[in-house]
Image (tube, helix red, strand yellow):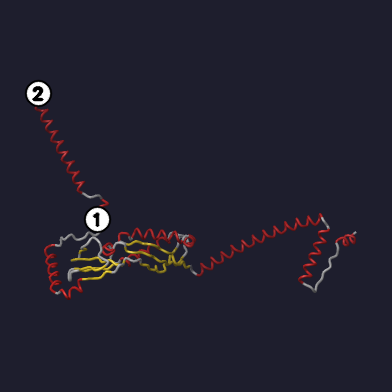
Amino acid sequence: MSCPICIIKNTTQTKRNRSETCWNDTMDMNMESQPPAHKRQEKEENVDAMKGNIGACGWIILILSALFAAVTFPISIWFCVKIIQEYERAVLFRLGRIISGKAKGPGLIFILPCTDTFIKVDLRVISFAIPPQEILTKDSVTTTVDGVVYYKVYNAIKSVANVNNVHLATAQLAQTTLRNILGTQTLSSILSNREEIAHNIQSILDNATHQWGVSVERVEMRDVRLPVQMQRAMAAEAEAVREARAKIVAAEGEMNASRALKEASMVICESPAALQLRYLQTLNTIATENNSTIIFPIPIDLLQGLRK
């Protein structure tokens, strides 16, 4: 038999274990009931469709609107039926809420008067020119750069519900991104790495506008303008570099020519008759070009005799 003190201790320990078990079960249930962080984030980014919970007042307004459309049927049909083009989508609102998980169209859509409104969204590729931006480069050179951005709306609901004016927002973001990216580049890198810089700008814009339902297709840097003084300085620098290269090439040519003349003189010294042949060749060339002038060379042997 166990003593009363041991029985009391065992009972207390059992109650404690049961309470801890219940607490762990409750925490597990709460963790399971809460969605993961990425799912909550996606739910906040996406706009949920209306599931019919509009209240009694909303249903009364909808019934009255439907009755009004039925009573005035021959006339109301022209206001209730709308045509959406193939390249467009319509985001439909009923009592201020989106009534479908996706945009309507293309084709015919039906709306109720007084309660339904819709916004058309163009899904075609849109291009706009970035105004010339005056930028101070990394090497303290002031330049003016402009470009072109091509983008399209891939999610009509996000473009309407997540941003006020998606086209204006995209244009302003493109201008800011262009200034920020080119401000970290030198002038030489801007002039030589246009394609790489444009690709970086396109990636940044695409990531930033994804939550707006916009996909940036392409970014091109159209023109890079330099101040007149900088153009003159660069032209002078290029001219100096070309003159230096020309002098180097001329010096190399003179050196090669002197080496060839040295070898020719050594050959002529070995064979005195070669000098006479050279005289005759020169005479033939002069007679061909200038017929009125004839030069008779004095033989070298005669000059040697006079010298002796």
For image coordinates 19% across by 61% down, the residue present is 50
Whole-angstrom CA distance, mark 1 to mark 2, is 62 Å
Q: Which mark is residue 1?
A: 2
Number of disc labels: 2
Mark 1 and mark 2 lie on one chain; the one further toward the N terminus is 2
Callout 1, which amino acid? Lys
Picture quadrant where residue 157 is located: bottom left
Compared with 73, 58 (above or below) is above
Compared with 187, 11 (above or below) is above
**Near-viewer residue (30 or 307):** 30
In the drawing, does residue 254 fall left or right of residue 296?
Answer: left
In the drawing, does residue 21 fall left or right of residue 192?
Answer: left
Q: Which mark is residue 43?
A: 1
**Quadrant in which the C terminus is drawn:** bottom right
Q: Residues within 10 Å of mark 2 (few under 14, many from 20)?
A: few
For image coordinates 79% across by 70% down, the residue present is 287
